[in-house]
Image (cartoon, grey):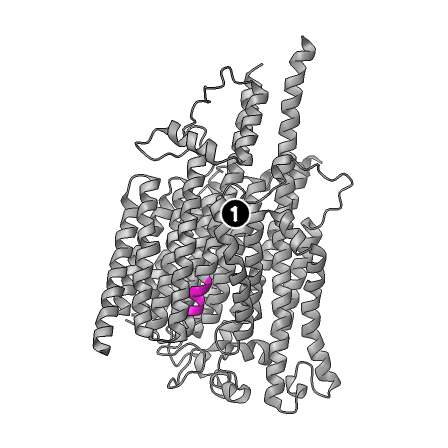
């Protein structure tokens, strides 16, 4: 039964991928991508990867769609038609490469086969059999993420950190010499035409933030952890931004604070490692944190998950703020330009007369 | 029994997907995405019972909380774009007038 | 007793699944946006309610059933609001239900939507040319004309 | 029935190649990013597929379940998704800057401007 669901979902994915290749209209491509993420999250659920499905659910529903949409809003939705030559070449390269890979899969173990090297390797048995006993944590993904592969996760967090800094450097805080005059219609930003939407959605923001905290803390027992919680938290703030405008959101949580938080999360992560060294253990060896090694592991995992959550939430929020501010400046500049043009047109006939 | 429900939901998802692919207006697509979100929530809940892993309801809860933001985002951008088109139209009218 | 519960939950699950099919079929086949929206809400409220209540019966009185109840509550709240916002945006964009006089809709819109977009457009129009007679509305713009960029 | 187990891999390859094709053929930079995203997601699906064990369960310890799917791919992909969205944002912000400076995001037009100047 699982196989049938799996195959149908894969067919959905294929049809969306083809539509995305064919369409000239980037707006619909971006929306199809939203569905693509929904389907792939369902697929992850069917393939037993609940933590991954949760991350994909948190990322795919709001954040990635909105980033592409903001870019499109300032760059345009249409793709111009093009000569066929390059497409044929690209198609040929893709087909040849794909055929080679299909040939390669023929020697691979079938999906879910217990003889596959992934499952027979001793480390897989270690992770599924020894780790719950050693760690005392039912969810095997969390200790694997935070403890066994703690260095790796530190690196990933650093990458997220770097990406956030990069976005800030590129389109972040503009220190304009002459700040744009605020167009009156833009003073109250966001979905101000939708009263019902505002009233209802406002009620949803606290539950989202609360749920993010739950996901953050519950990662030991069920799906969840710092990465998911960070993205969910940022999505809650994003909802606020959509409803009330980016200026209002920036007054609630200031970009300056966010910049500090980005660094703080990573510092917490690295700081735990340093504390371990000071207490005579190895870097990120949490067993030194308490008298009982297992308690130490728990404290260590909770702390670094908190660090990851803070960094991810701050980075994603910063990214969304930067993008939204960029779009707002763009729209306001355009409005001002059009309005000045209109004013000029209005005055010129009079002066001529 | 869960399997039958899951299959029915998959069929519904397929039909919704066709609507999302065909359009014709952006609002049809938003409608389809929204409905796809709802059926994904149901699908995940049903699969969680099918696999006897009840932790998956957390994912359904996340979707129920967040799938909404995507819809609002798209609506906002449609509105921004609508404003742009209105302004450009006004601009064109102005150019034609004198 | 447990058999009765099982049968009840099966009936609920299956009817929910069938309703989702009905709803999706309507979304696929109905001719225009507002009718499709009407069909989509069947799944959003009744279909979701049936499937989730079937699952709640299976779960019994546990945390899981509480979570499922929350899911139902959230779905009922968000999908209806989203549908409302969607219909409003579509109307503001110039897509009107079939068989309804656009003038009526537009009159309702200009009263109910004192938004910045309408103000912006009106201002832009006034700059271009002050309306000759205040009663006369600008002609309705069919959505096909000019072509929305995503059509 | 054995070929059913390969369908995941083949679909993953087709998805990956359509992302690759989009990346190669598109001249619009946003479309390139969409292609990259497609490519990336297909890799995620591949990893998760390899971790699946037939009759295995979700890797959360539960009473009465002996075999679990391999959690290692899950960990790798979980972090990769978040890193992926952060790096996509970086790419998109580069596109925004390019649009600000060149007034276009079509590769040809940008190249033409570079040649002229």
Which region is colored magenta? Answer: B57-62
Q: Residue furthest right?
A: A177
Q: Nearer the viewer, residue D52 or C39?
A: C39
Residue at point 42%, 65% (across, down) = C70
Q: Is the residue C24 above or below the residue B9 in the image?
A: above
For the C terminus of chain D, give its image quadrant: top right
Residue behind mark 1: D31
Residue A147 shown left or right of residue D16 in the figure: right
Dot 1: what SS? helix
Kindly report the secondary structure that dominates the magenta region of the rendered protein: helix
Residue at point 38%, 44% (across, down) = B28
Q: Chain of mark 1?
A: D
Q: Nearer the viewer, residue D53 or D16?
A: D53
Q: Is the residue A81 above or below the residue C137 in the image?
A: below
Residue C125 shown left or right of residue C30 in the figure: right
Quarter of image, res D13: bottom left
Residue at point 69%, 55% (across, down) = A255
Residue B1 shown left or right of residue C119 in the figure: left
Where does the image place residue D44, in percent across and percent down from the top left? 48, 65
């Amino acid at each position: 039964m699982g196989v049938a669901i799996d195959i149908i979902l894969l067919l959905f994915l294929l049809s969306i991928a083809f539509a995305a290749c064919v369409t000239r209209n980037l707006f619909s491509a971006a929306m199809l991508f939203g569905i693509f993420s929904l389907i792939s999250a369902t697929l992850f659920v069917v393939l037993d990867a609940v933590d991954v499905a949760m991350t994909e659910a948190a990322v795919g529903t709001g954040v990635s769609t909105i980033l592409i949409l903001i870019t499109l809003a300032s760059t345009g939705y249409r793709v111009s038609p093009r000569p066929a030559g390059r497409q044929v070449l690209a198609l040929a390269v893709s087909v040849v490469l794909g055929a080679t890979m299909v040939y390669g899969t023929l020697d691979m173990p079938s999906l879910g086969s217990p003889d596959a090297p992934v499952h027979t390797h001793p480390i897989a048995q270690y992770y599924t059999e020894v780790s719950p006993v050693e760690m005392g944590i039912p969810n095997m993904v969390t200790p694997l993420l935070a403890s066994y592969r703690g260095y790796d996760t530190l690196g990933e967090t650093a990458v997220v950190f770097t990406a956030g800094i990069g976005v800030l450097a590129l389109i972040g805080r503009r220190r304009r010499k002459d700040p744009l005059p605020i167009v009156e219609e833009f003073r109250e930003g966001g979905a101000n035409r939708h009263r019902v939407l505002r009233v209802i959605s406002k009620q949803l923001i606290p539950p989202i933030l609360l749920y993010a905290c739950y996901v953050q803390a519950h990662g030991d027992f069920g799906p969840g952890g710092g990465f998911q919680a960070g993205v969910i938290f940022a999505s809650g703030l994003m909802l606020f931004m959509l409803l009330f405008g980016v200026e209002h959101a920036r007054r609630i949580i200031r970009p300056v604070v966010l910049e500090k938080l980005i660094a703080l999360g990573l510092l917490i992560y690295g700081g735990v490692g340093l504390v371990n060294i000071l207490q005579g253990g190895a870097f990120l060896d949490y067993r030194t944190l308490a008298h009982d090694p297992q308690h130490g592991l728990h404290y260590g995992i909770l702390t670094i998950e908190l660090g990851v959550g803070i960094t991810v939430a701050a980075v994603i929020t910063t990214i969304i703020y930067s993008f939204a501010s960029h779009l707002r400046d763009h729209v306001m500049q355009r409005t001002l330009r059009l309005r000045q043009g209109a004013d000029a047109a209005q005055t010129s006939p009079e002066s001529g007369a | 029994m869960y399997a039958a429900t899951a299959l029915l939901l998959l069929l519904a998802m397929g039909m919704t997907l066709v609507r999302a692919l065909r359009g014709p207006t952006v609002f049809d697509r938003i409608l389809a995405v929204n409905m796809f979100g709802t059926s994904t929530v149901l699908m995940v809940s049903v699969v969680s019972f099918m696999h006897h892993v009840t932790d998956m309801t957390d994912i359904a809860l996340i979707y129920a909380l967040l799938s909404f933001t995507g819809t609002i985002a798209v609506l906002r951008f449609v509105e921004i774009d609508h404003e742009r088109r209105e302004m450009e139209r006004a601009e064109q009218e102005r150019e034609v007038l004198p | 007793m447990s058999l009765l519960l099982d049968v009840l939950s099966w009936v609920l699950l299956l009817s929910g699944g069938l309703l989702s099919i009905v709803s999706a079929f309507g979304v696929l086949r109905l001719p225009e946006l507002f009718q499709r929206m009407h069909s989509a809400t069947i799944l959003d409220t009744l279909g979701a309610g049936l499937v989730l209540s079937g699952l709640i019966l299976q779960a019994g009185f546990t945390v899981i059933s509480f979570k499922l109840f929350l899911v139902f509550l959230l779905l009922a709240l968000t999908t209806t609001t989203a549908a409302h916002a969607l219909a409003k945006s579509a109307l503001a964009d110039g897509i009107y239900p079939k068989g309804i006089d656009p003038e009526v809709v537009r009159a309702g819109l200009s009263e109910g939507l004192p938004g910045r977009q309408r103000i912006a457009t009106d201002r832009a129009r006034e700059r271009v040319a002050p309306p000759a007679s205040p009663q006369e509305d600008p002609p309705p713009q069919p959505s096909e004309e000019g072509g929305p960029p995503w059509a | 029935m054995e070929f059913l187990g390969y369908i995941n891999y083949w679909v993953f390859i087709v998805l990956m190649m359509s992302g690759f094709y989009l990346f190669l053929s598109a001249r619009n930079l946003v479309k390139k990013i969409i292609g990259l995203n497609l490519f990336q997601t297909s890799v995620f699906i591949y990893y998760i597929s390899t971790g699946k064990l037939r009759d295995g369960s979700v890797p959360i310890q539960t009473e009465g379940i002996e075999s679990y799917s391999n959690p290692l791919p899950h960990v790798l992909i979980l972090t990769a998704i978040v890193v992926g969205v952060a790096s996509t944002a970086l790419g998109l912000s580069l596109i925004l800057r390019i649009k600000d400076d060149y007034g276009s995001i079509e590769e040809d037009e940008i190249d033409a401007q570079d040649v002229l100047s």
